[in-house]
């Protein structure tokens, strides 16, 4: 049905038999390699060729140089106190101090940076805020799950399965979780039914 709309501009409403015309443009965005997905059979080729009329490549923020300052200042001006020239110049200084930062989260990470800078600058004073106060470094490893908690979970699941051998629903209910959660945890811990 979507292919028909894209190709002919015609559709039929649910419960109707009358064909209607529409004049729309479809904008689709992805970070996947769609031509490769088409080759691998993971994306419909006929849909790809109907969508791929105009292909725009947008480079990530880390490859856009001075655009970071322009976008950052635009976002900063939208926030409370963002039109103050002194705060704007201090904010631009902070962006320059961030220098070669990679902006892994792209525009969302920049937006987070801008909002945090704005809040800190308004509350702590513009001159006392540093980039390290604002940027969360990605170098810190994620905390490891506690081994004691995992073994406790495993024992509770095994006990629930032992007490309710004929019913996954009853075992899940006794643990206070859904069957899907129970299955997921069983798979995680390698527990067989």
Image (cartoon, rainbow, N blue to C red):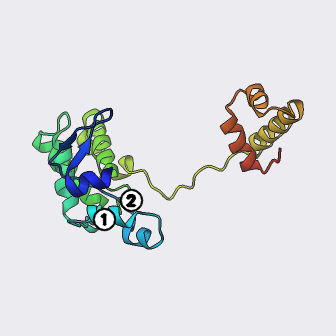
Seen from this angle, which residue lies furthest front?
Answer: 17
Q: Is residue 156 left or right of residue 114?
A: right
**Where residue 4 appears, x then y in whole percent?**
28, 53
Dots 2 and 1: beta carbons under 8 Å? Answer: yes
Nearer to us in this view, 168 or 78: 168
At 41% from the left and 69% from the top, the residue drawn is 38
Q: Quadrant of residue 64?
A: bottom left
At 18% from the left and 52% from the top, the residue drawn is 25
Query: Which numbered disc, 2 or 1, marks the residue that appears first in the sequence?
Result: 1
**Where residue 117 appears, x then y in whole percent?**
29, 43
Q: Which numbered dot is residue 62?
A: 1
Q: Is residue 192 left or right of residue 139?
A: right
Mark-to-mark CA distance, 2 and 1: 8 Å
Q: Quadrant of residue 69?
A: bottom left
At 17% from the left and 49% from the top, the residue drawn is 24
Residue at image mark 2: 104
Where 65 sits versus 91, above or below?
A: below
């Amino acid at each position: 049905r979507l292919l028909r709309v894209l190709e002919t501009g015609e559709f039929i409403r649910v419960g109707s038999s009358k064909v209607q015309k529409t004049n729309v443009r479809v904008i689709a965005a992805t970070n996947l390699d769609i031509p490769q997905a088409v080759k691998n059979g993971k994306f419909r080729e006929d849909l790809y060729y109907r969508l791929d009329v105009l292909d725009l490549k947008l480079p990530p923020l880390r490859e856009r140089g001075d655009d970071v300052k322009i976008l950052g200042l635009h976002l900063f001006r939208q926030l409370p106190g963002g039109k103050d020239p002194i705060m704007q110049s201090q904010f631009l200084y902070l962006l320059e101090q961030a220098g070669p930062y990679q902006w892994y989260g792209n525009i969302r990470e920049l937006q987070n940076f801008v909002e945090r800078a704005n809040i800190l600058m308004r509350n702590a004073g513009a001159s006392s805020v540093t980039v390290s106060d604002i940027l969360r470094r990605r170098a810190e490893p994620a905390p490891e799950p506690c081994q004691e908690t995992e073994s406790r979970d495993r024992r509770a699941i095994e006990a629930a399965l032992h007490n309710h051998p004929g019913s996954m629903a009853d075992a899940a209910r006794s643990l206070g979780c859904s069957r899907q959660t129970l299955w997921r945890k069983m798979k995680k811990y390698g527990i067989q039914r």
